[in-house]
Amino acid sequence: MSKPVSSMLLGNAEAKTCYYLPNAPTLPLGWSYRQADAAATLIALNGNHWRKILTIMAKLSAPDDDWKNYRDTQLLKRDEQILIGASRLSSTPERHIIVGAVSAAKLNINSTNTLFNRLDEQDRLHANGLGVFISPYLDYRQFPNSLIEQLKPYLNQ
């Protein structure tokens, strides 16, 4: 008898950074993060919503300013993974980015906890000093480039 799956992992299981998201994208049969067009396939099947998610992830993760090439060729293959619907933090990654209020609630993590420090003036980014970050949802309105630039240095420490 099999047990129900409580979460879904997309990307490298040995990644250094895990993004926790509430909803899974549509995936074609046989899709793998290892395939050359993995990001393009996700974007083609899921539209602008997932293009925004993957673009913000790439801007946060790219080692240089060429985030578009990183998104299209390296994202999820090397140092990132997405855990959908998780109820606890993964043990493998060094950095955990809790994306949005729904993911934080599912993980029972609250930014008002005294363990978390505010990282920005608008009180949208929080960190606990142990590699756990709470961020807004990966959408340009909630997570503009200015906020990406504020979080990125903490991820590269």
Image: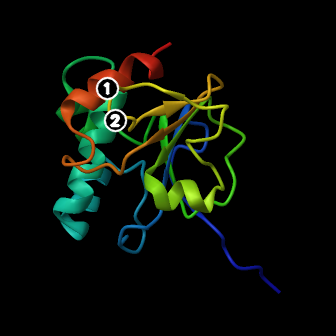
Q: Is residue 64 above or below residue 121?
A: above
Q: How many marks?
A: 2
Q: Is residue 155 above or below residue 48?
A: above
**Quarter location, residue 9:** bottom right
Q: Residue furthest bottom?
A: 1
Q: Is residue 91 above or below residue 64?
A: below
Instruction: Locate residue 28 relative to residue 104 in the image: left or right.
Output: left
What number is the disc on residue 74? 2
The residue under label 2 is which amino acid type?
A: Gln
Dot 2 and dot 1 residues touching (CB under 8 Å): yes
The spot of residue 145 in percent (x, y) is 20, 32
**Quarter location, residue 123:** top left
Of mark 2 and mark 1, the one earlier in the sequence is 1
Which residue has dot 1 on it? 62
Residue drawn at x 34%, y 30% as measured from the top left: 60
Which sits in the foreground, 30 or 131?
131
Q: Nearer the viewer, mark 2 or mark 1?
A: 1
Which sits in the foreground, 23 or 35?
23
The spot of residue 48 in percent (x, y) is 16, 60
Residue drawn at x 30%, y 35% as measured from the top left: 58
Residue drawn at x 27%, y 58% as measured from the top left: 50
Disc 2 and disc 1: Cα gap in Å? 9 Å
Tag 2 secondary structure: loop
- Mark 1 neighbour class, 10 Å CA radius: few under 14, some 14 to 19, many 20 or more: some
- Mark 2 neighbour class, 10 Å CA radius: few under 14, some 14 to 19, many 20 or more: many
Q: Residue furthest right?
A: 1
The spot of residue 120 in percent (x, y) is 37, 26
What number is the disc on residue 128? none
Instruction: Locate residue 24 relative to residue 52 in the image: left or right.
Output: right
